[in-house]
Image (tube, rainbow, N blue to C red):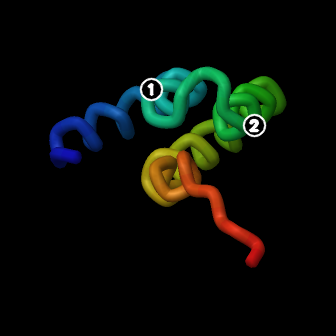
Amino acid sequence: MSGCALFCEVIIAILLPPLGVCLRQGCCSVEFFICIVLTILGYVPGIIYALYAILCVDRDMYRGEYYTLA
């Protein structure tokens, strides 16, 4: 991901935290719903979580991987 795209996502996350998370993680993800709840409870917790979800959570690491037990 380019630096300009990441910068734009961070700016969007600061202005509208759920929108930034939706663009990065998708609108039906747990991160998106957590961000909505935190933004409703308080704007600053929503921003903090949105920045965490955009900068630290790698969505590709959890998608499409199935582990075998044996």
The residue positioned 57% from the left and 55% from the top of the image is: 65
Relative to 6, 67 lies left or right: right
Give the image location of residue 11, x and y in percent.
Answer: 36, 33
Residue 46 seen by the camera: yes
What residue sits right under mark 1 in the picture? 23
Q: Position of residue 3 (x, y in %)?
A: 18, 47
Side of 53 relative to 1 (left or right): right
Q: Which residue is mark 2?
A: 34
Q: Nearer the viewer, residue 64 or 51?
A: 64
Would residue 33 appear left or right of 55 to someone viewing this image? right
Tag shown at residue 41: none
How many angstroms separate mark 1 from mark 2 (CA)?
15 Å
Determine the secondary structure under disc 1.
helix
- Up-down relation of residue 39 to residue 58 (above or below): above
Image point (66%, 39%), residue name = 31
**Residue at the image point whose x is 75% and y is 37% from the top:** 34
The residue positioned 35% from the left and 34% from the top of the image is 9
Q: Are marks 1 and 2 in contact (CB under 8 Å)?
A: no
Q: Amino acid at mark 1?
A: Leu
Specify the amino acid type for callout 2: Ile
Give x and y (percent) for residue 6.
28, 42
